[in-house]
Amino acid sequence: MMSSQMDTLTTTADLVPFHGCAFVPTMGALHEGHLSLIRQGTQMGGPVVVSIFVNPTQFAPHEDFDQYPRPLDRDLDMAAKAGAAAVFAPAAECVYPPDVPVAAPALPPVATTPGLEDGHRPHFFTGVCAVVARLFDLVRPASAIFGEKDWQQLQVIRAMVEADPSRFPLQIDSGPTLREADGLAMSSRNAYLDAAQRDQALALSRALELAQGLDPTAAEGAMMACLLDAGLSVDYAVIRDAVSLGAPRADRPTRALIAASLGSIRLIDNGPV
Ligand code: PAF
């Protein structure tokens, strides 16, 4: 199917002409952050394929799988305007065929040991690695681009690919987090915030600013105080090694990472420190 000169693909066979593409996996509800990854992909020379698939296996039963926004026509239009050659929007049976066993990748330590997303959403990386591995098998891209907003996810996918180069012969690239003018990191879940919550949510980017120039202990204290003062419920506000997400070391890049909730709306953010 064509949408403003862009192909909409739904089957494995549809993907064959696009093998070797630059690939941007998404769950749809596209925003400027996704579009910047698509534009980044267009600089790589080949076609850009965007997948839109709300992956059930990365949601726990109490999470927002049913509520997750699915504005497909709007997404197709936005992806086409950003320069995507095709959108792959498969049915669940294509990704998880009931009659064909699909090899689930082993989870790397960065998916199971830091106590960050892995600690608070124990199902999450099993689902993300399963779907990303399957999408890589189907799309067969030369490169895939992920947003840095999901920092632990990015490290997990890099480690998964590095651990099995024969199954995953591709390059992993990343694009920076895009922010609203007031600092709020762009996210499809921002649509859930009412005006008062959106104001409270600014505490995440403010906390990351406060962490700058402080030693790790002081930075964690300052971030926690900022988030609690704004009335958020905090899962973590920590300084970690930027790659292993273990304890920070003075001789290696470090990252500040936050997850905090406003009622049932859970937000994450991160930045270099
Ligand atoms: O970051 C996301 O949108 C999802 O976790 C991903 C990578 C598309 C897998 O469903």
Image: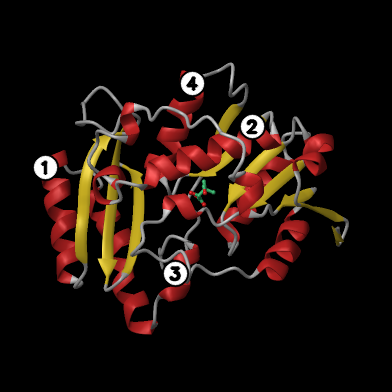
Disc 2 versus disc 1: distance between alpha carbons? 42 Å
Determine the residue positioned at 41% across, 34% down: 156
Binning the other alpha carbons within 10 Å of mark 4 as few (below 14), some (14 to 19) or many (20 upward) gives some
Q: Quarter-wise, where is residue 21 in the image?
A: top right
x and y percentages locating residue 36 in the rendered image: 62, 52
- Counting residues from the start of the chain, the first of labels 2 and 1 encountered is 2
- Is 108 above or below relative to 185? above
Disc 3 versus disc 4: distance between alpha carbons? 32 Å
Identity, as a three-letter code, of the amino acid under mark 3:
Asn
Identity, as a three-letter code, of the amino acid under mark 4:
Glu
Whether pointer 3 and pointer 4 mark residues with C-beta atoms closer than 8 Å, the reply is no
Disc 2 versus disc 3: distance between alpha carbons? 31 Å
x and y percentages locating residue 232 in the rendered image: 21, 68
The residue tagged with tag 3: helix, strand or loop? helix
Residue pointed to by mark 2: 137
Whether pointer 1 and pointer 4 mark residues with C-beta atoms closer than 8 Å, the reply is no
Disc 1 versus disc 4: distance between alpha carbons? 32 Å
Residue pointed to by mark 3: 190
Placement of the C terminus among the 4 image quadrants: top left
Mark carried by residue 162: 4
- Counting residues from the start of the chain, the first of labels 1 and 4 encountered is 4
Task: Report whether 195 appears left or right of 175.
Answer: left
Mark 3 vs mark 4: give the one in front.
4
x and y percentages locating residue 24 in the rendered image: 63, 45
Placement of the N terminus among the 4 image quadrants: bottom right
